[in-house]
Structures are given as structure tokens and as C-alpha cells.
Amino acid sequence: VSTVHDLTRWTAFLRDPHIGSAATWHEMLEPAHFPQGGDGSYALGLVDESHRGTRVLHHAGAVLGANSQMLVAPEHRLGLAILVNRSDISATELGWKVLDALLGEKLGPVAPMAPGATDAAGFYVHAGSGRTIALEVVNERLCFDHQSQYAPLAVDGDAFVLNQIGFKTTRLNLAGEGSEAVGGARRVRDDLV
């Protein structure tokens, strides 16, 4: 449990870290390496990634009835701490919108959405892990749904590309219901989308 004051002190420190060695910071920002191959984007309490061409350190949290998002764009010397005491408002979604509004034209463009890509909305099962993947249409964009936090997907050839809001750039190849997975996930149901 934390406070806005604690989180703003933490964001100030992340903009200008002055405690610990370079090796400590490297270890803290080193992403997880999965035994099955590949890397995650989550390190030791922080996600370090690019959002529309800008480096962002971030971490979200939630408890029953409340949620939070901390975002830092070090090269812009910007830190945000958002705490919400409601479960129907997403601090994560709000935080990324505020970051986009504050940095505006300093950010790269939003990845384009291919026509017809929204037809892929539905529930999928990842071939390797068995994990359920939900894709939903939000504001006319196909999005990856992670605990009701929506990350827009771009289309690159025959794959969807997830490259923001807490996820390392990931290619997602999808197969239709009842068919074999093609390098990624197989649709299992679409009646809940």
C-alpha cells in the first residue's frame, strides 16, 4: 500500500536515480527470461519499454475497489502517479492517456489498424502455454485485453503486433476456431465479445 506522495517521490527518483550502482539498476531493469524462450517486459518491479518511440518505466497495481498506475518518461523528465479508489475506472488507461496528452507531438505516431482486423475479436488459447488471450474491439480498434486494460494491436502482414501498455513488442499469429494454431493462438469462442 502506498500514497500519491510516496509514488511521486519514486517517480522523481526514477527520473534521476542517484542511489545504487549501474549494476544494480541494470539488474532492476533486466526483463524476465522465459524457459520456453523469449523475454517478458516485467523486471524487478518495473516495466522498461518504448511507447510510441519514447522510453517509459511503469508499474500498475490493484486491490479490491482501487487501482493505480505509475509512469515515468525519463528523457522528458515526466513522472505520473495515478491512484483511483474505484474499480470501474482504470488508472492504467487514464495514465497512458495523460502521458499521451502531455507529450503530444513529442511521441511517435499511433500504429495504423488494418481494415477488417476487428473481425479477429474473440477468445484464443495460446498454443505453447495454454493461456487464454482475449481480443476486443475498443473505440473501433482491435485490442489485447489484459485484466480489462486494453492495448491496441497493429497489423503487420499476417500477424498482430502488440507494442505498448506494459507489453514488450510481441507478434501474435491467430488461427480460426477449431483449426490448428499458427505460431500462436487458436480461437476458442467469440460469443462473449
Image: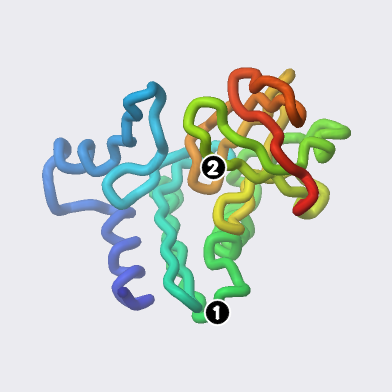
- Label 2 element class: strand
What's the distance in space between the residues labelled 2 and 1, CA to CA? 26 Å
Tell me where residue 50 appears, x and y as whole percent. 49, 38
* Residue where numbered disc 1 is placed: 86
Judged left or right of residue 40, residue 162 is: right
Picture residue at 22% right of the left edge, 37% below the top = 26
Q: Describe residue 49's horizontal placement relative to residue 120 as left or right.
A: left
Q: Is residue 166 left or right of residue 159?
A: left
Determine the residue positioned at 30% across, 52% down: 45
The numbered disc on residue 51 is 2
> How many neighbours does mark 2 have within 10 angstroms: few (below 14), some (14-19), or many (20 or more)?
many
How many marks overall?
A: 2
Q: Image quadrant of residue 34? A: top left
Residue 19 lies, in percent from the top left, at 14, 53
- The kind of residue on which mark 1 rests is Arg
Res. 23 image quadrant: top left
Q: Nearer the viewer, residue 15 or 122?
A: 122
